[in-house]
Amino acid sequence: MFGNVTMPPVVMSLGVWGQRWVESSLSLKNLDPSLLMWDMRRNLDPTPLPTRRCTIHFLFPELASDKRSYWLVIDGGKVDLCSTNPGFEIDLYVRSSLRSMTAVWTGLSTVRKEIEARQIELTGDPGIAQSMQQWLGLSPFAKEKSRVSA
């Protein structure tokens, strides 16, 4: 499954191939924050989050102001992505470089490793922060390990 839509086999095959054979440093260039956030929205698992509405603000400080902030609003098991402030109280602030968040999303790193390296900073609800690796989920291709020699 890819969000609520099953990916066609050819798309899955291409994605698996890319994850296996494209050098990870190349895959972390020319990143698109909107695409990353849209994919994260589609694959987010609301189960570890509180049952009340949760709003998570992602900030990519190195980007231009119109691409810097995104909000995920999780309410009743539904996940919405906003590129403008939805006006709700923020439960968790996630400050990260786009490269670090993409590395986590693609399975090249983990939330914990990026926090320890001071590349991701979490501020807000400690329970939501602690469970981020679980609710964030991963790209459907993240489980494929690279076969490119270092």
Image (spheres, helix red, strand yellow):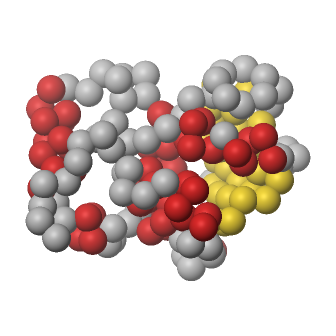
Residue at image location 19% in from the left, 54% down from the top: 146
Q: How many marks?
A: 0
Residue at image location 81% in from the left, 47% down from the top: 126
Using the image as rendered, state which of residue 109 and residue 34 is in the foreground: 109
Q: Is residue 100 visible?
A: yes
Q: Position of residue 134 (x, y in %)?
A: 57, 36
Q: Quadrant of the C terminus?
A: bottom left
Using the image as rendered, state which of residue 18 and residue 5 is in the foreground: 18
**Left or right, 77 with reference to 92:** left
Q: Quadrant of the N terminus?
A: top left
**Left or right, 56 with reference to 147:** right
Q: Is residue 84 visible?
A: no
Vertical arrangement, residue 81 with respect to residue 52, above or below: below
Residue 67 quadrant = bottom right
**Left or right, 18 with reference to 71:** left
Q: Position of residue 4 (x, y in %)?
A: 43, 22
Q: Position of residue 139 (x, y in %)?
A: 38, 42
Vertical arrangement, residue 133 with respect to residue 52, above or below: below
Residue at image location 24% in from the left, 42% down from the top: 144
Q: Position of residue 44 (x, y in %)?
A: 54, 34
Vertical arrangement, residue 87 with respect to residue 31, above or below: above
Residue 11 quadrant = top left
**Left or right, 16 with reference to 5:** left
Residue at image location 78% in from the left, 23% down from the top: 51
Q: Farthest residue toward the right? A: 89
